[in-house]
């Protein structure tokens, strides 16, 4: 019934796991085995006309490049002409032996875990708080969503100016008497990743709150009314009804958050640049890919990194769908929908 | 049953959870927490905006201070520069073209997925659903090579085409349930009146799915407006820069002129914020399930 992206996603997730990517690009011309003889060619024509353009665009600019990446990843290639210097799994061996990649992978891992831990609970509490029909709720919702709308480049530029050693944050700490807390927020390897986490949380927590609010509002009012009639207190209602029924939304959010953390690029690249990120301890797989691939002209190698990144994300996503999201498919959300 | 619930519930639940339609004032604690959180959300943005009204010496003497006196030179300087407007123009072209194409193509294919019975429909849906798993980051290097081979580097079209491809999965996944929710009776009635299915698509489906179209259109536009990675790889010529690239180029070009960088940054924030303010009901509402099929 609901047509929000989120619920639609959770509703119809199963195909992602069961079919391989790029399963059938020619689906637009189905085998005509239908009994309706006369209308059949017409139907096929309509299907082709209507779905052809989208499928062509999608396959050409999404599926094809990813397949190409897998192909180029087997070559030592500078990006000119056809790749000829076949190195087999050579690029992959280099990646797996490279300490810089291990570091980047670990940073990605830290970001995945900390994003969930830092944003999740705070966002749930805020959503509970805002899930009341109080005056001003619209404007509150809009304002907490603002950081999410602003582009990563602007967020990165603004925060990196604020967090400079001689920047506004240190100045503010000094002026409220906490000068001892002044730090090199961006360059100290012990601190930089935490600064990054603060920026990430600031940028994306609004999205989590709005998503959770969406989940809470799809819970039928009758449940709350019934609980209230039975004399349940506000906190009992939240604990026994809202939180359990919010489960599917939280799990979808966690999924999006994990995938986003694994692919993180823009913020790190803008704030730390392509070389500093490694020494500051904030490099990610994506910045590693750009620094060692395109920037240094090793396109074959860059593609191999992309493939590793893709496989890691895919495996994590499939495991997550298999073991965490599966419950939702047979569970609350689908039943509630019907 | 509902009648009794309505009559009894408010009495019992008055102190905890208002369940009438009319909003009322919440507890001060709620507002206090909300205010603290909003301040945290808006603080950095205010820093950028206010910094643009200061001079570099003001900023270096007191980085976290307020403008004193207020200076308008930085903003005027940016507003009168052609680079800024050109970058806005480029971003607009890319955004509008991407959005229009994504919505049109997405609507057509979603109609097929929602309303046609054919072999391979499940596979087609999975193809798009799987697209959610194909992030731009992974495809960027081959995309760069592909676009280069097409001769479209330093051409806005080179950014638009891949963006259409990458925005399609979300669009399809949002629109299919939307179109499914259009009553089949409408289609039958139209068929009785002699409308073909294509005719039904153009005359009925397109107008009826406007709310879904707006939601997906906004998502596509904001995605395009904020996209950084693709322009970074594909656009090297300053005259083709979109706004995010422009902000970055400007901040490295004028790295010593912090005030001007802040002015440029805050001005480039405005279009997205205006757009968001105009459509916030759709964006927030679209996510909060206000757009019910």
Image (spheres, coloured by chain):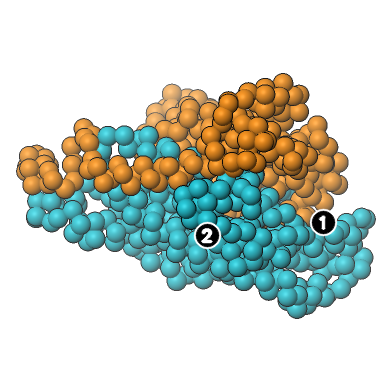
Chain colours: A cyan, B orange
Q: Looking at this view, is B261 or A291 the one in front?
A: B261
Q: Looking at this view, is A212 or A197 the one in front?
A: A197
Label 2 environment density (alpha carbons within 10 Å; few <14, some 14–19, many ≥20): few
Q: Position of residue A263 (x, y in %)?
A: 62, 59
Q: Which residue is mark 1?
A: A295
Left or right placement of residue B59 versus residue B6 in this view: right
Tell me which numbered mark, 2 or 1, is placed earlier along the sequence: 2
Left or right placement of residue A12 versus residue B47 in this view: left
At a point 65% along the width and 32% down the height, the residue shown is B55
At a point 35% along the width and 44% down the height, the residue shown is B34
Q: Looking at this view, is B18 or B260 the one in front?
A: B260
- Chain of the residue under the numbered disc 2 shown in the image: A
Residue B168: give its label: none
Q: Looking at this view, is B88 or B33 the one in front?
A: B33
Residue A181: give its label: 2
Q: Position of residue B77 (x, y in %)?
A: 71, 24
- Which dot, 2 or 1, sits closer to the camera? 2
At a point 24% along the width and 42% down the height, the residue shown is B28
Residue B238 lies in what quarter of the image? top right
| Quadrant occupied by the N terminus of chain A | top left
Check the image and report above or below for A175 versus A88: above
Label 1 environment density (alpha carbons within 10 Å; few <14, some 14–19, many ≥20): few
At a point 13% along the width and 51% down the height, the residue shown is A228
Check the image and report above or below for B206 versus B35: above
Residue B26 lies in what quarter of the image? top left
Q: Position of residue A309 (x, y in %)?
A: 67, 65
Check the image and report above or below for B170 versus A246: above
Q: CA distance from mark 2 to mark 1?
A: 37 Å
Q: What count of labels does the image hold?
A: 2
Secondary structure found at label 1: loop
- Chain of the residue under the numbered disc 1 shown in the image: A
Left or right placement of residue A51 versus residue A115 in this view: right
């Amino acid at each position: 019934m609901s047509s929000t992206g989120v619920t639609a996603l959770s509703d119809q997730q199963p195909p992602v796991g069961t079919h391989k990517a790029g399963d059938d690009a020619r689906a637009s011309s189905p085998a005509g085995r239908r009994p309706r003889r006369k209308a059949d060619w017409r139907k096929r024509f309509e299907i082709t006309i209507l779905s052809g353009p989208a499928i062509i665009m999608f396959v050409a600019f999404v599926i094809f490049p990813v397949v190409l990446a897998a192909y180029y990843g087997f070559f030592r290639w500078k990006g000119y002409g056809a790749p000829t210097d076949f190195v087999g799994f050579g690029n992959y061996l280099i990646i797996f032996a490279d300490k810089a990649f291990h570091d980047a992978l670990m940073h990605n891992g830290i970001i995945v875990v900390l994003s969930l831990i830092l944003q999740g609970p705070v966002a749930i509490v805020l959503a509970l708080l805002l899930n009341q029909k109080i005056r001003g709720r619209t404007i509150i919702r809009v304002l907490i969503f603002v950081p999410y709308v602003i582009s990563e480049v602007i967020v990165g530029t603004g925060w990196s100016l604020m967090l400079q050693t001689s920047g506004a944050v240190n100045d503010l700490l000094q002026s409220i008497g906490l000068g001892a807390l002044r730090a090199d927020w961006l360059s100290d390897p012990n601190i930089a990743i935490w600064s990054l986490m603060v920026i990430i949380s600031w940028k994306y927590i609004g999205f989590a709150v709005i998503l959770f609010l969406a989940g809470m509002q799809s819970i039928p009012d009758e449940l709350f009314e019934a609980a209230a009639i039975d004399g349940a207190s506000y906190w009992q209602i939240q604990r026994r009804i809202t939180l359990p029924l919010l489960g599917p939304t939280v799990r979808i959010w966690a999924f999006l958050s994990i995938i986003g953390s694994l692919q993180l690029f823009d913020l790190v690249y803008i704030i730390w640049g392509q070389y500093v990120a490694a020494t500051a301890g904030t490099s990610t797989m994506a910045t590693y890919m750009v620094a060692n691939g395109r920037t240094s002209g090793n396109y074959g190698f860059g593609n191999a990194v992309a493939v590793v990144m893709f496989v890691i994300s895919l495996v994590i996503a499939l495991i997550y769908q298999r073991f965490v999201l599966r419950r939702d498919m047979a569970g609350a959300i689908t039943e509630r929908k019907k | 049953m509902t009648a009794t619930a309505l009559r009894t519930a408010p009495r019992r639940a008055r102190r905890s959870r208002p369940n009438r339609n009319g909003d009322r004032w919440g507890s001060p604690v709620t507002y206090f927490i909300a205010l603290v959180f909003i301040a945290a959300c808006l603080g950095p943005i205010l820093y950028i905006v206010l910094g643009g009204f200061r001079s570099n010496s003001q900023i270096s003497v007191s980085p976290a201070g307020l403008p004193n006196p207020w200076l308008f030179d930085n903003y005027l300087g940016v507003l009168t520069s052609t680079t800024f407007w050109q970058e806005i123009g480029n971003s607009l072209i890319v955004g509008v073209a991407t959005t229009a194409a994504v919505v049109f193509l997405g609507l057509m294919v979603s109609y097929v997925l929602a309303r046609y019975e054919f072999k391979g429909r499940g596979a087609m849906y999975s193809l798009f659903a799987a697209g959610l798993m194909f992030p731009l980051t992974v495809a960027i290097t081959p995309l760069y090579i592909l676009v280069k081979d097409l001769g479209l580097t330093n051409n806005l079209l080179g950014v638009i085409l891949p963006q259409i491809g990458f925005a399609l999965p979300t669009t399809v996944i949002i629109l299919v349930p939307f179109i499914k929710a259009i009553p089949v009776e409408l289609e039958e009635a139209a068929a009785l009146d002699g409308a073909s299915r294509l005719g039904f698509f153009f005359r009925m489906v397109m107008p009826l799915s406007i709310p879904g179209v707006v939601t997906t259109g906004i998502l596509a536009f904001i995605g395009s407006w904020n996209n950084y990675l693709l322009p970074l790889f594909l656009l090297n010529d300053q005259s083709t820069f979109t706004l995010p690239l422009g902000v970055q180029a400007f901040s490295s070009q004028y790295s010593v002129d912090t005030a001007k960088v802040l002015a440029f940054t805050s001005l480039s924030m405005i279009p997205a914020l205006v757009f968001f303010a105009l459509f916030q009901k759709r964006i927030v509402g679209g996510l909060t399930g206000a757009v019910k099929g």
